[in-house]
């Protein structure tokens, strides 16, 4: 029931506000006589908003502004629009102080995305009045805000470019205002905002205006075209910042596909390509690589100027890639160039090496680009001679082409086009297809295929060697009892080394798998050693091979396999579980360690294995089945050592999408020569750069810092890291508290990850630190500290 | 009280700007004292006799002061005549740059008139110097108390170096005379800037009363393109320009472009006035645009990097070059000499200003493309060169006038310095869109403008207290709304308060609160009690709310 009085009062407010504000915003609602009582409308609006202002005497603009601002957040669109109108009026009447202007600005920007068209119009109007403000900062802000507009009618946009008031041909502008009064003028308030903005005295305002011009151009094609005219004029601006911003705006337009260069702009545009300023040239080239030039004449002049620019600045290699993309975007024009070039090259030259000329190089690249353009029929037209010359410029061309094709495939393509035999044997996929390819049309997919196949080839080779390594390991396992332990160690070590070499040459999943395999071999070696030490009856062989230590090492190795890789497939997880099973079995085998903890772990692993094989897609190995049986029978009647003998390593080669989890820790400005300083007994800051690979948000990371006996763990909040899912990084400063009373010390820092072992809690830490077992993600880093000398 | 505005010149025409404004109390200010370039007879000067009462002869007594807005001859040309021939000895005000450049302009024109055209000398060089000695320089935003009542203040107007808009105030009556101004900045001058003032009258120029100009960027672009094309083809570019303003503007543009494009072609200034003017520009840097003000500590933009020393013999040299030569419309002098030499080659380019007076060669070139121009019976020029027309007007356009008028919101507007039909159009717009009264008197017409009058009243303490109390009581939040100290204390508060205005003979009017009224009149309060049959009783003050009474009585009737 509140609405009718509200509407009534707002429309009365309109009458008086509009009359007091500006008569060049004729409002169809403005029918009554203008009552110019400035205070009244605001009081009425206060009352309308139910704020109980009975006296109607708000004191000063600040109160009005505040009241209007609060109304502008109200629920009724008409009230919101009127509030904005009121704000505009306040701005015009008073010497608006800083606070008021900012508030108005805030309101206008806030309501720019309002769902009601009337409100949006009103906010544009408010901003427009601010764009002509006498204060520079207000104008800058106003233009910034204009650039943020998301929904605005084309009429307003076009009007904002032209100082002349555009007469509408239809009455479409007046939907909200009711049908009674067809509007004579639509948005006179918006007239020429940008025309003024780009001519502003202050370059900051001009920059802001340019930016907004570019940003808004994606909303309307007609607007974009007109805005281009203005922007082109801005290229002669005397401030470099404005020129760069203009180019950026154009680039923005080009990326949104709303940039159509006309002939009249070409002179300006090409002039920029030979500008004295390198960044201007660069920005212009970027745009040129994206635009569409409708006429051959324009295309040719663009190419010519690029060549001139190339002759002047030989060091700017990007010009080649721009030439390529320009050529590629205009297939039929480039084909034309190619024909002329072919004639020119074929002509007998007077002993000069024409290929050295930048012009010929440039034209060659343009001609070659035809082959990559989307125009199918043009591709046949490239004369053969072009390709034969292109071969000598292979490096430049492949550089210009960028990531599309690699150099070898390109060379093979050129050779094939010119009929020169090419080392086809190296590319197995080519043999199957033969070299009888007639059309160029399918060359691209073929080149891509070749690229792919060479990649595959690498992988196949790698996997073959991996397979042979695995076979070797398996063979070694079977002969481990019969031959000397040293030979076994040697074989395993060689295998690992070979794997490491392979791993260093591969990346992605393959690399991850290879390093996983290394870990696996580590584990196998430990197992061999442990079994060996059991055989030796562990009476004298102490030291590094003592079973306790070996067991610990095996545990760590298994933990690493389990935690440092993501994206296991089932087969691999079973593998790791079996190793865990074995490790736990070793634990059991030792007299006196048959604790509940080990049994719990064993139980967990068996459950996990069961779970993995539950749907029958995998089968438990004989070893696992036997252990399960023994476990169910509480190991009564089962000799643990016999069970141990049942294990057989059988690494799978199917690795799926395996990823390595890793971390890198770096310390800034610190080495033995250049130690950081600290004060004895006081905390010291360690400034670190941490980057993480494939860490998921569930992982719990700690930074472990060790000095002598004291260990400090600091939890790392993953949310403070920037980056994507794959690589995250951050620079952080972490305090180390327990600085020793010494004149210098070395702090060993290391990133560790908590390694959840199911529900089995392994130990309870009472002090701050990771719970459960941990693995080290990074290498241990030494940080050097020296005490500041104090007197 | 009224303001009388007598338009002595530039009424419904362009030329000899001169407006005399008479405030109440006999204060009279003459704004501008220009001459008309189109007339050779007595019409060239404003009709100063109209200022004098019948029989009087003393201009000094008739006028409080003269204020000159800028150094263009149609604004200052009659000043030496007025002071030295007519014998006005009162104060003359103009800005520092105007004072510096005015003698140059005046002497240049005097020479042209006397030496070249052989006309009778209106005033001598000594007259000019004597006249300038009477001038009191003004600075921007400096308020000058001309006498006890009259104060004037200058605001930046763009247009040319040193141009100002003048604000004048006598008592409560205030006006602004704009002179010529520009609302869009150009390369060497900023945009006009003025405070929000409470005005009774705005006298504004209206050169472009109807025209809305587009962005000048496109014109600049075309100009640079044409020049670049010409010089890269080995041609020579002749830019006829007046010494001040356009020459500097174009040269900054070219110098900047040369720098960016790394061009090595020489740019020349034909000697004389232009070089002298450049020197003044260098000194008066504070009156130029923002960009120049910012950068001059590092590099004075009027030290043009690519401008070379020039000698007359250079015009016969081969190879491309750009030459600025006076006068601007190729009406004679050096620019004509060069034009004769260069016009026959199709490689060359002549850049003309947007407007040329009829009869000059510039005008002939603009109207169609003649192939042959006859200078006199014996000499004629074959014109094969390219012609480029470039209009850089330092006047504001229609939109600018509207913007300024809207911004200042005066009660009345008077248009001067424009052409009649366009002025009529603008008058309509101002009246309909801005709701202000507007007129455009012809020369020698007088317009009388009523002024608002302020009346001082006293207010009782109670009234003021209640006014403030209301505010805080009703909205406790408002106390927090006073944005720190940002609000100027004296600004108009647009609150509404209720009170009673008491005007008594021989006493200052007083405003007081309703309940104080009886006390101050020495009367007692009477209460009327109704005692109806109904047990309820209604109390009504004697001030009486009859509606309430009635309704309650009706209510009783129903009972």
Image (cartoon, helix red, strand yellow):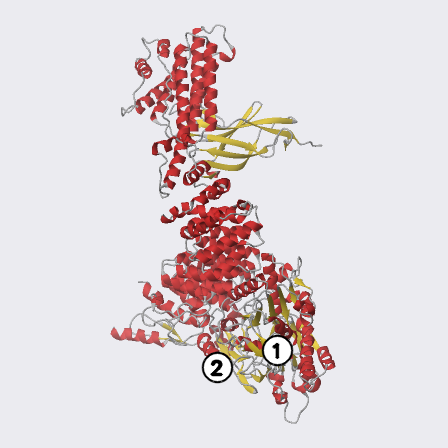
Q: Is residue B101 above or below residue A281?
A: below
Q: Nearer the viewer, residue B196 or B10?
A: B10
Looking at the rendered structure, whether the residues under marks 1 and 2 are on a common chain is answered as yes
Q: Pointer 2: what residue?
A: B421
Q: Is label 1 in a helix, a strand or a loop?
A: loop
- Up the image or down, A109 lies above or below A656; here it is below
Please tell me which of labels 1 and 2 falls first in the chain: 1
| Nearer mark to the viewer, of 1 and 2 | 1
Q: Is residue A118 left or right of residue B493?
A: left
Q: Chain of mark 1?
A: B
Q: Given the current orientation, which residue lies at the most extreme bottom position? A: B55
Left-right relation of A325 to B530: right
Name the element at disc 2. Answer: helix
In depth, the one of B216 and A89 nearer the eye is: B216
Percent x, y of residue A636: 32, 10
Residue A209, visible in the rendered structure: no
What is the x, y in percent for residue A490? 48, 14
Q: Chain of mark 2?
A: B
Residue A51 position, x and y percent, is: 40, 61
Q: Looking at the figure, which quarter contains the C terminus of chain B? A: bottom left
Q: Is residue A686 left or right of residue A168?
A: right
Mark 1 to mark 2 CA distance (whole Å): 29 Å
> Residue at the left extreme?
B558
- Which residue position is annotated with label 1? B331
Which residue is located at x 49 percent, y 48 percent? A347
Q: In the rendered view, would you say A241 is above or below A649?
A: below
Nearest the eye: A339 or B180 = A339
Which corner quadrant of the image does residue A450 belong to? top left
């Amino acid at each position: 029931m509140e609405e009718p009085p509200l509407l009534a009062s707002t429309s009365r407010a309109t009458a008086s506000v509009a009359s007091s504000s500006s008569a060049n915003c004729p409002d169809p609602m403005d029918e009554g006589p203008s009552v110019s009582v400035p205070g009244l409308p605001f009081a009425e609006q206060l009352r309308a908003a139910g704020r109980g202002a009975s006296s109607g005497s708000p004191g000063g603009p600040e109160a009005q502004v505040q009241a209007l601002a609060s109304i502008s957040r109200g629920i009724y669109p008409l009230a919101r629009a009127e509030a904005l109108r009121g704000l505009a009026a306040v701005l015009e009447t008073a010497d608006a102080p800083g606070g008021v202007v900012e508030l108005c600005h805030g309101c206008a920007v806030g309501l720019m995305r309002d769902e009601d068209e009337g409100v949006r119009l009103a906010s544009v109007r408010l901003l427009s009045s601010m764009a002509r403000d006498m204060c520079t900062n207000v104008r800058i802000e106003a233009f910034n805000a204009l650039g943020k507009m998301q929904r605005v009618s084309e009429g307003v946009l076009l009007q904002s470019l032209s100082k002349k008031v555009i007469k509408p041909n239809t009455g479409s502008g007046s939907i909200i205002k009711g049908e009674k009064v067809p509007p004579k003028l639509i948005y006179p308030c918006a007239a020429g905002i940008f025309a003024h903005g780009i001519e502003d005295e202050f370059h900051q305002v001009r920059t802001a205006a340019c930016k907004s011009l570019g940003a808004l151009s994606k909303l309307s094609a007609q607007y974009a075209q007109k805005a281009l005219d203005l922007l082109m004029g801005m290229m002669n601006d005397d401030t470099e910042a404005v020129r760069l911003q203009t180019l950026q705006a154009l680039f923005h337009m080009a990326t949104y596909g709303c940039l159509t260069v006309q002939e009249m702009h070409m002179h300006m545009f090409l002039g920029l390509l030979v500008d004295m300023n390198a960044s201007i040239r660069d920005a212009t080239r970027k745009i040129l690589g994206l635009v569409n030039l409708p006429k051959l004449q324009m295309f040719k002049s663009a190419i010519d100027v690029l060549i001139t620019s190339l002759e002047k600045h030989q060091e700017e290699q990007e010009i080649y890639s721009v030439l390529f993309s320009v050529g590629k975007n205009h297939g039929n024009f480039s084909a034309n160039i190619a024909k002329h070039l072919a004639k020119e090259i074929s002509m007998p030259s007077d002993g000069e090496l024409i290929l050295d000329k930048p012009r010929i190089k440039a034209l060659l690249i343009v001609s070659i680009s035809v082959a990559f353009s989307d125009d199918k029929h043009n591709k046949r037209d490239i004369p053969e001679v072009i390709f034969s010359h292109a071969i000598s410029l292979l490096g430049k061309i492949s550089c210009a082409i960028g990531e599309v094709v690699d150099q070898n495939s390109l060379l093979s393509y050129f050779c094939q086009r010119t009929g020169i035999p090419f080392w086809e044997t190296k590319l197995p996929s080519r043999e199957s297809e033969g070299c009888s390819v007639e059309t160029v049309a399918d060359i691209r997919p073929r080149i891509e295929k070749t690229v792919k196949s060479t990649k595959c080839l690498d992988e196949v080779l790698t996997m073959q060697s991996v397979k042979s390594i695995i076979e070797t390991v398996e063979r070694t396992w079977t002969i481990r009892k019969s031959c000397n332990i040293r030979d076994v160690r040697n074989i395993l070590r060689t295998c690992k080394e070979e794997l490491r070499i392979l791993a260093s040459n591969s990346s992605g999943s393959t690399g991850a798998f290879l390093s996983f395999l290394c870990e696996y071999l580590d584990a196998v070696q430990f197992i061999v050693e442990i079994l060996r030490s059991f055989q030796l009856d562990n009476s004298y062989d102490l030291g590094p091979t003592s079973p306790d230590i070996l067991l610990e090492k095996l545990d760590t190795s298994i933990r690493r396999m389990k935690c440092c890789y993501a994206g296991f497939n089932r087969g691999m997880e079973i593998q790791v579980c079996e190793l865990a099973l074995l490790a736990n079995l070793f634990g059991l085998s030792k007299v006196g360690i048959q604790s509940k903890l080990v049994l719990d772990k064993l139980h967990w692993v068996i459950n996990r294995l069961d779970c993995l094989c539950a749907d029958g897609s995998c089968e438990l190995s004989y070893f696992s089945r036997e252990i399960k049986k023994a476990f169910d029978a509480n190991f009564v009647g089962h000799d643990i050592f016999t069970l141990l003998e049942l294990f057989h390593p059988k690494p799978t080669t199917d690795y799926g999408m395996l990823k390595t989890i890793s971390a890198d820790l770096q310390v800034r400005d610190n080495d033995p020569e250049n130690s950081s300083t600290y004060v004895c007994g006081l905390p010291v800051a360690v400034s670190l750069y941490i980057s993480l690979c494939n860490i998921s948000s569930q992982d719990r990371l700690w930074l472990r810092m060790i000095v002598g006996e004291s260990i400090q763990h600091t939890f790392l909040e993953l949310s403070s890291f920037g980056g994507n899912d794959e690589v995250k990084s951050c620079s952080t400063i972490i305090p180390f508290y327990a600085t020793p009373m010494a004149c210098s010390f070395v702090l060993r820092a290391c990133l560790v990850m908590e390694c959840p072992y199911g529900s089995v809690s392994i130990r309870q830490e009472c002090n701050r630190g990771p719970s459960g077992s941990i693995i080290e993600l990074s290498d241990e880093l030494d940080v050097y500290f020296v005490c500041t000398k104090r007197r | 009280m009224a303001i009388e505005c007598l338009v002595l010149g530039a009424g419904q025409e362009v030329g000899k700007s001169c407006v005399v404004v008479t405030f109440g109390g006999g204060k009279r200010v003459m704004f501008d004292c220009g001459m008309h370039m189109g007339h050779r007879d007595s019409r060239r000067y404003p009709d100063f006799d109209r200022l004098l009462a019948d029989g009087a002869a003393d201009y000094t007594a008739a006028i409080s002061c003269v204020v000159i807005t800028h150094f263009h001859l149609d604004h200052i040309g009659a000043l030496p005549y007025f002071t030295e021939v007519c014998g006005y000895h009162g104060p003359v005000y103009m800005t520092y740059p105007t004072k510096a450049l005015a003698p140059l302009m005046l002497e240049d024109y005097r020479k042209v008139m006397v030496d070249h055209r052989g006309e009778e000398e209106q005033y001598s060089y000594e007259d000019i110097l004597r006249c300038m000695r009477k001038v009191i320089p003004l600075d921007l935003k400096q308020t000058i108390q001309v006498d006890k009542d009259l104060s004037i203040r200058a605001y930046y107007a763009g247009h040319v170096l040193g141009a100002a808009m003048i604000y004048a105030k006598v008592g409560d009556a205030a006006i602004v005379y704009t002179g010529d101004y520009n609302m869009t900045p150009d390369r060497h001058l900023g945009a006009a800037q003025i405070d929000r003032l409470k005005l009774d009258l705005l006298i504004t120029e209206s050169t472009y009363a109807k025209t809305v100009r587009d962005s000048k960027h496109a014109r600049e672009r075309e100009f640079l393109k044409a020049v670049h094309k010409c010089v890269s083809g080995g041609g020579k570019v002749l830019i006829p320009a007046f010494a001040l303003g356009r020459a500097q503007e174009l040269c900054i543009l070219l110098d900047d472009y040369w720098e960016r494009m790394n061009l090595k072609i020489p740019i020349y200034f034909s000697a004389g006035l232009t070089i002298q003017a450049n020197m003044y520009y260098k000194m008066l840097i504070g009156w130029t645009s923002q960009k120049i003000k910012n950068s001059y500590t590092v590099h004075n933009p009027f030290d043009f990097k690519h401008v070379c020393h020039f000698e007359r013999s250079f015009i016969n040299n081969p190879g491309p070059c750009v030459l600025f030569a006076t006068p601007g419309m190729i009406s004679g002098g050096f620019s004509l000499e060069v034009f004769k030499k260069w016009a026959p080659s199709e490689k060359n380019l002549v850049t003309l200003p947007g407007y040329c007076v009829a009869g000059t060669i510039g005008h002939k070139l603009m109207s169609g493309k003649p192939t042959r121009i006859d200078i006199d019976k014996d000499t004629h020029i074959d014109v094969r060169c390219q012609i480029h027309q470039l209009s850089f007007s330092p006047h504001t356009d229609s939109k600018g006038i509207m913007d300024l008028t809207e911004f200042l919101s005066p009660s009345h507007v008077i248009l001067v310095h424009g052409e009649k039909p366009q002025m009529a159009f603008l008058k309509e717009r101002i009246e309909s869109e801005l709701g202000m009264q507007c007129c455009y008197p012809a020369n020698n017409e007088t317009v009388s403008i009523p002024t608002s009058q302020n009346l001082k009243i006293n207010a009782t303490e109670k009234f003021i207290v209640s006014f403030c109390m209301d505010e805080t009581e009703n909205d406790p939040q408002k106390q927090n709304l006073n944005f720190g100290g940002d609000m100027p204390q004296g600004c108009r508060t647009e609150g509404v308060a209720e009170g009673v205005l008491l005007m008594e003979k021989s006493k200052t009017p007083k405003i007081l609160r309703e309940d104080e009224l009886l006390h101050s009149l020495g009367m007692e309060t009477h209460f009327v009690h109704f005692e109806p049959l109904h047990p309820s009783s209604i109390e009504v003050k004697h001030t009486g709310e009859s509606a309430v009474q009635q309704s309650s009585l009706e209510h009783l009737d129903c009972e």
